Amino acid sequence: MAGKKKKRGKGKRVDEFQLRKNLRDQVGHKDSDEEIEKPEEEQDLSQFADMIRIGGVEGRTTAERGQIFDEFLYNELTFLIMYLTALSGGTLSSLVIIDEKGTPLTEVKGPDTNHWSIGMAEAVTRINTMVQRGKEILEIPDEVPLAALGLCLSGCEEESSNRLLLETIQEMYPNLAKEYILTSDTLGSLRTGLENGGIVLIAGTGSNALMVGRNGTTIRCGGWGHMMGDEGSAYNIAHRACKIVFDDLDGLAQAPEAIAYVWPAMRNYYNVIDRTEMLPHIYTNFDKTKFAGFTKEIATGCEKGDPLCLYLLRENGKMLAKHVVALARKAHNEIKLTSGGLNVVCVGSVWKSWKFMMDDFAEEIHESKAVDELSLLQLNVSAAVGACYLAAEKIDCIFDKPYDKNVEAFYHYKRENYVKPPTPIVTKAKFVLCGNQKAEGD
């Protein structure tokens, strides 16, 4: 008798487990019995019917590392993957959600969303995870889509691949948003700070420049990646520094200034003894972001007065100016004659070294005679705000946009007031390699 009861009891437990599993699958929850008994209450979304929430995602390129996503705790495993990705550097993303009046409600940080580097499905998954975290913060159910979502992402310059990315989003996450607009990160940065056209010049790990006219036409300069461009970027500065050292030690071309600081700094940063050990960093294990990170050491050398580092930054200032000149020659007077002249929104970590690039930048602009006046602007808010603006326009949601508060001018050039600065006198400094290990070239 006891044995039979045991069998019946065991069978009952199995049936109950299967029933509970079926119920969980039906309502989409894995929580307590109480939650399973209230599926109808949780599915009542009528209170959100008239709510307008607009999202914008910015995917940008930067040489910065170790940024901690203190809000991004939506899923422990997803967070860990994204956090470790962020520590490796590269493109970082931000999501901003606003209401119908343009008021920012929340901001969520995320990792790389460039589909060329991580694949379509992974990029879409990361975007969805950011949006779901934003919804969770605002207590919006997952089933309620945003009214519109603007995606201004690095790598989204090609129409056919953009179309495929949108199709992937709608297939994988149909409740993410009702309407979408997808474009490059450069346009998101520009629309954050300027309403009626201008130039955005990105100088981070890579570089890119885009000019938008008042009629919406766009013209680009650069942005072709490290194999065909990236002039003015952190990668380009690091690459030029390494090339100068290689050529100088080979006797192929004498360095414009002594390599006494840059060569030891290279060995220390890349953890190598000679140039042969540099080859894996350049080829086999090439990581663009890590390679570009050496530019931080160049900036440190500028602070110490190293002649070669100062030379590299001065040359970089000229190259950034050339991007502006190239676009300015194709610009209509309607954006050249605005308040402050031609407005240029500057994005990226290279601009932190502006003081070392300023004089040569200005001289290149002046010698070109391409513009009579220009203003360089930096963003005070995330470029994801510009992505929100674009999404709002997509659904005809009108509100006042505080462009003047979103940007701040840090440099103004006017031809008639320009005075060429005197040629800097660089004090030669001696640098010594720490440690007892003798390296190539010492």
Image (tube, rainbow, N blue to C red):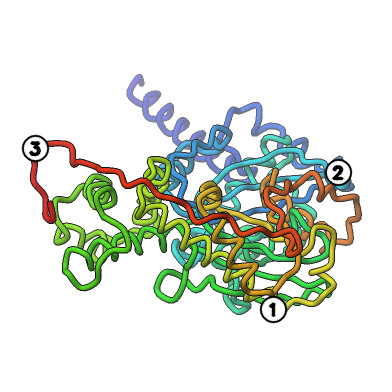
Q: Position of residue 440 (x, y in %)?
A: 11, 55
The quarter of the image holding the N terminus is top left
Q: Is residue 431 above or below residue 368?
A: above
Q: Is residue 316 above or below residue 368?
A: above
Where disc 2 sits, the SS reads: helix
Mark 2 vs mark 1, CA separation in Å: 54 Å
Q: Which mark is residue 28?
A: none
Does residue 166 appear anywhere in the picture? no
Q: Position of residue 321 (x, y in %)?
A: 59, 66
Quarter of the figure with residue 107: top right
Q: Position of residue 176 (x, y in %)?
A: 68, 54
Q: Earlier in the sequence, mark 2 or mark 1?
A: 2
Residue shown at the point (29%, 51%) measured from the top left: 262
Where disc 1 sits, the SS reads: loop
Q: Earlier in the sequence, mark 3 or mark 2?
A: 2
User: Three-letter amino acid code at disc 3?
Assistant: Asn
User: Three-letter amino acid code at disc 1?
Assistant: Arg
Residue shown at the point (72%, 33%) measured from the top left: 38
Mark 3 vs mark 2, CA separation in Å: 73 Å
Q: Which mark is residue 46?
A: 2
**Residue named by callout 3:** 436
Other residues around mark 3 within 10 Å, as few (<14) / some (14–19) / many (≥20): few
> In this orientation, which residue lies closer to the viewer: 12 or 48?
48
- Mark closer to the observer (3, 2): 3
Mark 1 vs mark 3, CA separation in Å: 55 Å
**Residue named by callout 1:** 329
Q: Is residue 194 left or right of residue 228?
A: right
Q: Position of residue 313 (x, y in %)?
A: 45, 56
Where disc 3 sits, the SS reads: loop
